[in-house]
Image (cartoon, rainbow, N blue to C red):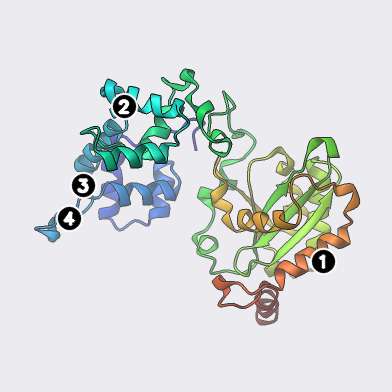
Amino acid sequence: MPHCYSQLTLADRRRLLHLRERKVSVSEIGRQLGRHRSTIYRELKRNTFHDREFPEYSGYYSGIANDISKERRRRLRKLRRHPQLRELVIDRLKARWSPEQIAGRLLADRVSPVRVCQETIYRFIYGKEDYALELYRNLPEGRRRRRRRGSRKPRDGLIPFDCRISQRPDCIDDRSQFGHWEGDLLIFRRELGEANVTSLVERKSRYTVMIKNRSRHSRPIMDKIIDAFSPLPAFARQSFTFDRGTEFRGFRALEDGIGARSWFCDPNSPWQKGAVENTNKRIRRFMPGDTDLSNVAQQQLVDLAHHLNSLPRKCLGYKTPAEVFMAHLRECG
């Protein structure tokens, strides 16, 4: 993936159409275009032409898809093209109305003939041209966190191309294989020390492992993962998917120590490891950000992980992660 995201061009869409006509898979199309497969799925979903009168003419056409994309981007600039609507939105924001309230009230009162949705207002607030107005300061505290984080660049240079998530096999993505894990780091308040917790989740069974660390140095974190997973058979620890935090840059140690491959999400894309992100929210119920880890022993983390693994999950047919995990160990062993 490039450092800065660029929109698909007409040439990209023509090549996409050509590959689609050849029945090439979405993952392979993404690889040849240098894009993540989710970008291709989104392009096909949003820019496919639908003809209600003649359904047989519906489909993805590169020229029409390019026009649909341009029209969508043009609509997002409506607050700059309609000064009166722009001033009305600014006045409501300064009166501490939320974008949802502004969009809903404009639709209910029909004050303006031009419709505007809440996402358009958010894009206006955080757009490059209008960010200097600092309208985000009028939003509720939770929404202010959406603001741009300055000029921080994603950590892209440390990750080899063959370790990026776009190269990960499809069988891992659809959770059809056992033994593929996602990992993340749970950080707590700095004034309480540098201690943190590594959370690891098996993608198919949602089985959770929690490991306490003294710092964010990469090699000690990797060594503890190796120690925790060494007792498992090789088929139960085939790969790990991480984000691009520097604490995971020692990933080669996993391959040398236990023979496990490592994959890395695209920059600023935590949703690509959704299983561990969901588990982190569950862990935070018991260990909020102000938890002092100096008072928490590793055994307490093991007990918490056991509790999480003993809860029935709807996605598992109301079986527990522990039951599913042990069943796969017996089946594959």
* Residue at which label 1 appears: 303
- Quadrant of residue 228 in the image? bottom right
Distance, label 3 to label 1, CA atoms, is: 55 Å
Identify the secondary structure beneath mark 4: loop
Q: Is the residue 181 above or below the residue 32 in the image?
A: below
Q: Nearer the viewer, mark 3 or mark 4?
A: 4
Amino acid at pointer 1: Asp
State if disc 1 and disc 3 touch (CB < 8 Å).
no
Amino acid, disc 3: Tyr
| Pointers 2 and 3 in contact (C-beta within 8 Å) | no
Residue 110: x, y in percent?
Answer: 24, 38
- Which residue is denoted by mark 3 in the rendering? 61
* Mark 1 neighbour class, 10 Å CA radius: few under 14, some 14 to 19, many 20 or more: few
Mark 4 or mark 1, which has the lower sequence index? 4
Q: Amino acid at mark 2?
A: Leu
Residue 65 x, y percent position in the rendering: 24, 43
Which residue is at a point 67% across and 59% down the rendered structure image? 282
Task: Give the quadrant of residue 105.
Answer: top left
Of all residues, the one furthest to the top in this rendering is 132
| Of pointers 2 and 3, the one earlier in the residue sequence | 3
Point out the tag, 4 or 2, that comes first from the N-terminus.
4
Q: Which residue is mark 2?
A: 79
| Element marked by disc 2 | helix
Residue under label 4, please give it.
58
